[in-house]
Amino acid sequence: MLRLELARLDREGAVQVDARVPADDPVLHGLEVSFDGPLEVLLRASHAGSGEIVVRGTVNGTLRLECRRCLAPVSNSFARELTMVFAPSRTPEAEDDGDVRFFKENAAVLDLGVPVREELILSIDPYVVCDPDCRGLCPRCGANRNIETCACAGSESDPRWDALRAKRDE
């Protein structure tokens, strides 16, 4: 779906890649997050003076996550700017070094799906909270402290800290 035709890029000098990637697209499988609706991808590819291809643009969508404190569902809109650099490689063993991705020198199409996926993985914050004042779950009984008050809150201390408490009291 996210493909860049290199012959068209050579002819036109710059190519726009617009796509709506469905939430169930195989390129998004295996991520620790899920999406509410499709991802909007708007990229512009152009040649750099050194023979490299520079792809810049944005990815927009809505993430469906769990609050890290109380596990309530949270929908979080995001917009990420991307900049990716691709360079032709004469050897098939060339590996991406993180800053530059390589493709076969005689390739006709550049698949942008996996690089966009990698950029998403690196830019998504998996630790969201439903509310900055979220009180979370009780560590003893598991009650959601945003909804109910449990009887065990603060009733006993953790015995693992007794040795330090004894030092403090000396």
Image: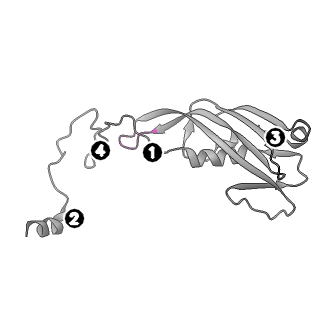
Which residue is label 3 attached to? 4
User: Dot 4 surroundings within 10 Å: few (below 14), some, or many (20 or more)?
Assistant: few
Q: Do the residues labelled 3 and 2 touch (CB within 8 Å)?
A: no
Closer to the chain start, of discs 3 and 4, is: 3
SS category of the residue bearing label 3: strand
Which residue is label 1 attached to? 127
Amino acid at dot 4: Gly
Question: Closer to the camera: disc 3 or disc 2?
Answer: 3
Which of 36 and 91 lies nearest the eye of the viewer?
91
Which residue is label 4 attached to? 142
- In the rendered structure, does residue 85 fall within the stretch colored magenta? no
Q: Are marks 2 and 1 in contact (CB under 8 Å)?
A: no
Closer to the chain start, of discs 1 and 4, is: 1
Can you give x and y, in whole percent of width and height, for residue 52 in the image?
81, 51
Question: Closer to the camera: disc 3 or disc 4?
Answer: 3
98 over 71 or under it: above or below: below
Question: Closer to the camera: disc 1 or disc 4?
Answer: 1
**Residue appearing at x 17%, y 48% in the figure:** 154
Q: How far apart are marks 2 and 4 (CA)?
A: 21 Å
Does residue 8 appear left or right of residue 99 in this picture? right
- Can residue 24 be seen in this snapshot? no
